[in-house]
Image: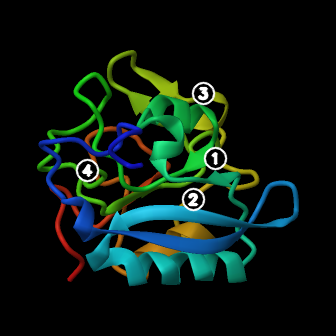
Amino acid sequence: MIVARGAWHRGCPVGRAELRRVEVNFHGFDGHVHRGVLVVNADVASSVAAIFTDLFDRGFPIHRMQPIEAFGGDDNASMAADNTSAYNCRSAAQANAPATRSPHANGRAVDLNPDENPWIDPRCGCFQPDSRYGLQRSGTGVITKGGVAWTAFTSRGWIWQDNATTDYQHFDTGYPSRPLH
């Protein structure tokens, strides 16, 4: 499925056998508990499970959590759906570092609630997927330094916004992509 849906293709730095599905419960914006899936590198699967268990235990809301193949590997479609995602070996037409260096293409990055935590797309110099939360850094599902999500990730060695542009949704294990210490 991951190949047929465009999330993995020849030239991706991580083989499919090195990826793991992490299934976790999360609190939705609708107040209900949902089951979500993140695809990550095997070397961070236990860390991701612990992070999202902590987020669940602390009541941090997540809008949606589906693997990127549910969106045909299209990061823009995933962000527009406010989808929390991880692994994605994006095509050259999408914004991305070279796959060998990309934390997402290596399965070592998570984008959390992209609508509430937008990034500045250097192609337009604008916040994507929506500018509403670009300057307003408070509200349901918003990541702030010292907040619940920031603490859940950084206390386990993950780095927030580890890239060249403002990217409030992004956590990774280090750029260029590398295993956790």
Cα separation between marks 2 and 1: 7 Å
Element at badge 2? Answer: loop
In the shown orientation, is residue 3 left or right of residue 177?
right
Residue 83 point in image, percent of width and height: 59, 46
Task: Decide: is 62 above or below 72.
Answer: below
Q: Characterize the local packing of mark 2: few (<14), some (14-19) or many (20 or more) Cα atoms within 10 angstroms.
A: some
Mark 1 or mark 4: name the one nearer the start of the chain: 4
Q: Residue furthest top?
A: 124
Q: Quadrant of residue 7?
A: top left
Q: Which of the labelled discs sits on residue 97, or is there none? A: none
| Residue named by callout 3 | 131
Mark 3 or mark 2: name the one nearer the start of the chain: 3
Q: Which one is in front in this view, the residue at disc 3 or the one at disc 1?
A: 3
Mark 2 or mark 4: name the one nearer the start of the chain: 4
Q: Which one is in front in this view, the residue at disc 1 or the one at disc 4?
A: 4
Task: Decide: is 71 above or below 93.
Answer: below
Q: Residue furthest right?
A: 31
| Residue named by callout 1 | 137
Element at badge 1? Answer: loop
